[in-house]
Image: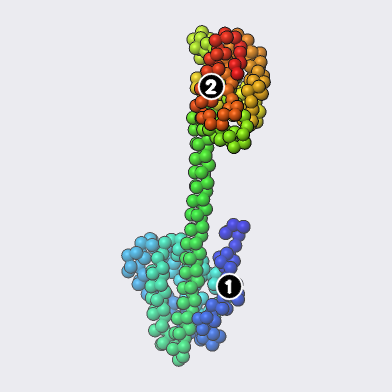
Amino acid sequence: MNYTDKTLLERMKITKIEILERLNILGLHDEEIRLLSKSRPFIETKIEHIINTFYQKQISNDEVAALIGDSDTLVRLKEAQHAYILDLFSGKYDADYVNNRLRIGMVHKRIGVDPKLYLTALSDLKYIIIPILIENITNTETTIRALDKLLTFDATLVFDTYIDSIVSEVVSSKEKLEIYAHNLERKSKEFERLSKLDSMTGLYNRRAMQDMLNRELIVSKRRKSNLSLAYFDIDDFKNINDLEGHNKGDKVIIFISSLLLNQTREVDIPCRAGGDEFCLILPECNTINAKNICTKILAKFIENYPNYNLSIGIADTGNNYALKEYDLIKSADSKMYKAKKENAQKIQI
């Protein structure tokens, strides 16, 4: 539910019981409320004097005058103050009264009225009203004390809205910060992911290949399982670019990339080692099984590009779990060059 679906009273969860408790805590009892209500006729006869005196005092403060801003706003404020003062002496301090005070607090906070200015204005109003009470009633001390309690009641409600607004701002800022942090983390992860990929093929780049090969070597050692690495190279790739154009060369590279992605096992890790060279990391796989996988890739390549040659070298860890990633790459690369010397579509293991 949105804030606009609730009154301020509902939003701040101030119930009728809560209102009575607040009045009781301040010691504002029925007899004092009756005295305030009884004073209303005297206040009504002097209402214009009270309002004019009050705002003369307020606009003498440059900070307050700047907040008011213009004569039209001053007229509207005087009208609102008229209702506010009469409410003080209504004798009815119920949910409607409280909701009105909460709204005053919300507006004051929204336009940037400093709490010290509000409290000063409240004090000014009290000391404008007190002489009128003294002049017109007999039970002066009790009535003034009741007014003081009621203005304190009003102040607590106004400051409740200040606090609620600040808490809402903090919550909103926290939510925005969490969203920002989440987006930043998401972008950071995306950037990290993209930094590991070859932009042209979507395969892992050489740096990522080395990291993953290191990781898989550790896993292979722990499990005492075989790890194979297949090294692919397009024969005479420079001639393809020079004679048939770079677009053709790019298509061949992208096609091989798609084969490495789609003609392999889910656990296999295809990488672009650079230029026209590719690697395929094959966990839990010996050279025989690796050759079977590479044979399928080679067959698909020949089917689409019968005039081109692929050279493939395969190396595995065997029982030598002390191998480093560069050892395995060097071995697979060496076997790939042996395959290339055969001058045909060959796989060297």
Q: Mark 1 is on which residue type?
A: Ala
Let me know if residue 283 appears in the view: yes
Residue at screen point 53% across, 19% down: 333
Estimate the x, y position of residue 330 in percent, counting from the top left: 51, 22
Q: Is residue 116 above or below residue 145?
A: above
Which is nearer the N-term, disc 2 or disc 1? Answer: 1
Q: Mark 2 is on which residue type?
A: Ser
Count of labels in the image: 2
Give the label on residue 95, or none.
1
Label 2 crowd bin: few (<14), some (14–19), many (20+), radius 10 Å: some
Q: Is residue 100 above or below residue 280?
A: below
Estimate the x, y position of residue 53 in percent, counting from the top left: 37, 75
Q: Which image quadrant: the N terminus?
A: bottom right
Estimate the x, y position of residue 226 in percent, counting from the top left: 62, 29
Residue at screen point 36% across, 70% down: 58
Residue at screen point 49% across, 43% down: 184
Q: Residue furthest front?
A: 319
Give the labeled residue for mark 2: 331
Where disc 2 sits, the SS reads helix
Q: Nearer the viewer, residue 95 or 134?
A: 95
Q: CA distance from mark 2 to mark 1?
A: 85 Å
